[in-house]
Amino acid sequence: MDIKENNTKLVDKFKNELNIEGYSQRTIEMYSMYINLFSNFIKKDLINITSDDVIEYLSYLKKEKKVENSTMNLILSAIKHFYSNFLKKDLELKIKLPKKANKIPVVLTSKEIITLLENITNERNKLITQFIFSTGVRISECMVMKIKNLDFNEYTGKVVSGKGNKDRIIIISKNWVEDYKKYLEKRKIESEYLFCNGIGEPLSVDTVQKFLKVAAKRASIDKSVSPHTLRHSFATTLLENDVNIRYIQQLLGHSNLNTTQIYTKVNTNKLKIIKNPLDDL
């Protein structure tokens, strides 16, 4: 059996163990992907890896691939978990990577949201865009959302096993519900999923990212528009409407309030009405 085949089997066992331990599907796929990429780069049996191999890989990612600090930390976490928890091997990795830069999120104004929607001609894609913006769900949560998890009478929904394997309640738009019901009546594919491909399976994240970029270009929006931009826009819109930040934290599924606090830096509407002291002189 060659090295590649050995490593593939080992990663499969790793995925099974993560599943038994109760990790979310998103985490399992992410961790296994990072280990596979590491394996492809280092071209050694994963059991025989040393700390120098890991340092070489991280240096390559930083220098050659210009990988961001936040992603570097995720990759390092995956590698540490693989060796320490799964293989029970101490690589003595004492690397400290810089923390994720506390950047202000990119958000869309109400006018930009309207223009973006006007430039999405596909009915399903428009409903996806509206759903993410009006609920604040992560793209990974949206893709696996099932119809049974939405209450069209109470205008609420439930995110099952979101980030951190936690469930949470979301609010859904009354207007969106009416439009979605009409769409569902016309949908020819039988599927349990809110949105699906031609065979009833969940859409890929890539599909959504691509049509949003196309629509943003058509709308002449000079910002980086992604599913996460819609989530950020949801949060800042609620803040502008004076919704308590604790409620926003719950709707977004943030474990720590500090994560939600970043949106207070985006909401500048209140700052704009403050009179400058120089004007009073």
Image: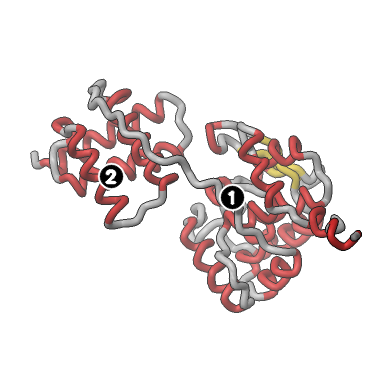
Along the viewing direction, whichever of 23 and 256 lies nearer the viewer: 256
In which quadrant of the rendered view does residue 183 lie?
bottom right
Residue 192 in sight here:
no
Q: Position of residue 66 (x, y in %)?
A: 34, 56
Snapshot colouring = secondary structure
Whether residue 29 sits left or right of residue 201 in the image: it is left
**Residue farthest to the front, as pictured:** 281
CA gap, disc 2 and disc 1? 32 Å
Residue drawn at x 62%, y 71% is: 122
Q: Residue furthest left?
A: 1
Q: Amino acid at mark 1?
A: Cys
Q: Check disc 1: other Cα within 10 Å, few if <14, some if 14-19, many if 20+.
A: many
Q: In the depicted view, which residue is nearer to us: 160 or 259?
A: 259
- The mark that comes first in sequence, 2 or 1, is 2
Quadrant where the C terminus sits is bottom right
Q: Is residue 227 above or below residue 35?
A: below
Can you tell which mark lies on residue 58?
Answer: 2
The image position of residue 20, as x and y in percent, is 40, 25
Q: Any mark on residue 142, and which?
A: 1
Q: Is residue 81 left or right of residue 162?
A: left
Q: Nearer the viewer, residue 198 or 277?
A: 277
Q: Residue, x 33% and y 45% (percent of image)?
A: 33
Say which residue appears at 59% left-offset and 50% top-offset. Answer: 142
Question: What amino acid does circle 2 point to?
Answer: Leu
User: In x, y percent, where is residue 129?
Assistant: 64, 61
Task: Name the quadrant containing residue 30.
Answer: top left
- Are the two marked residues, 2 and 1, in contact with CB atoms closer than 8 angstroms? no
Crowding near pointer 2: few (<14 within 10 Å), some, many (20+)? many
Residue 275's spot in the image, x, y percent? Answer: 87, 58
Please tell me which residue is depicted at 13% across the width and 40% down the height of the picture: 44
Q: Does residue 163 appear in the picture of this structure? A: yes
